[in-house]
Amino acid sequence: MNKEIVLKMSDIVKTFPGVKALDGASINIYKGRVMALMGENGAGKSTLIKVMTGIYNMDSGSLYVGNSKVDFRNVNDSQEKGIAVIHQELNLIPELSITENIFLGREMVNPFGTIDRSLMKREAKMLLDKLNIKESEDTLVKDLTIGKMQMVEIAKALSQNAKIIVMDEPTDALTDSETESLFKVIRELTAEGKSIVYISHRLKEIPEICDDITVMRDGKFICEAEVKDIDEEFIIRNMVGRSLDEQFPRVKVEKGKEVLKVQNLKNRYVNDISFTLHEGEILGISGLMGA
Ligand SMILES: Nc1ncnc2c1ncn2[C@@H]1O[C@H](COP(=O)(O)OP(=O)(O)O)[C@@H](O)[C@H]1O
Ligand SMILES: [Mg+2]
């Protein structure tokens, strides 16, 4: 199958004081396909995305959109070239409604040049329906769950009608059914010929939603492959730079004596929490954001 490159970044270097965040990073994005961008925490994924969208200037390297070389100076430049991004950090104004957040800075106007609220509300409603969100478009963002706020970020990116949509860890705060809705929308977008860059550390999501994968490590490009040709072990091996059995050496650990005991802890945030912690033990606590 012939793949058409819609965006190409090569040999990007980006330095922060004391840190080389990108040190030869490259990525290709193809028309109508989902590119997974993988790498451990700190590998440079978010920085690469911020260079791609004009938030950061690169020190060196090249960025092509289609056949034209571009040098984005700000986010507007990248938006003009059809790139939208859903950042890892939420960028919403809590006191404004869903509609106002979606169109913030890009308010729609009627032929008389005044802001057309009903048109924006209709558009917002359409986007919410598409994402299967039941909340009214007038709901204030501060009254939403974190997952729903993330969905509003996604609606905002969709409203830009971009050719390329970058999603930086979009499912982190989403429930399973919200993730389902997002995947459905991603499939619709690619069917329309749009391209997605998908960052996630949930390895299980990759075969489900992605076509291609680019792996980064220490700010460097490591490899690109088609998802159908690889497996989870390949991804991890390339992300960490060694094989799995080396990553988790079997160390025999004796748990020591009890050092902390929490029993039936309860306040306005938690309900009936109990655990004990022993010497020499690493106790993991997991749950969705806000759990
Ligand atoms: N604004 C910044 N200032 C200084 N260092 C940064 C900044 N942003 C990222 N870094 C550093 O750059 C490296 C890559 O970070 P990042 O792109 O956030 O990685 P990832 O998204 O893959 O977890 C890390 O070492 C991080 O600490
Ligand atoms: Mg990141």
Image (cartoon, rainbow, N blue to C red):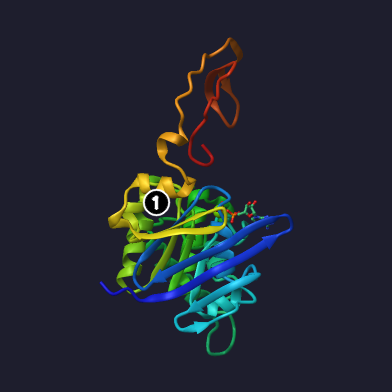
Dot 1 falls on a residue whose secondary structure is: helix
Percent position of residue 168, x then y: 50, 57
Residue beneath the point at 42% across and 69% down: 29
Q: Amino acid at mark 1?
A: Glu
Q: Is residue 226 above or below residue 161?
A: above
Q: Nearer the viewer, residue 73 or 176?
A: 73
Q: Nearer the viewer, residue 233 or 66?
A: 233
**Outermost residue toward the bottom?**
111
Q: Is residue 179 visible?
A: yes
Q: Nearer the viewer, residue 112 or 279?
A: 279
Residue beneath the point at 55% across and 68% down: 11
Percent position of residue 208, x then y: 31, 53
Residue beneath the point at 55% across and 75% down: 62
Q: Which residue is mark 1?
A: 178
Percent position of residue 82, x then y: 48, 77
Q: Quadrant location of residue 1?
A: bottom left
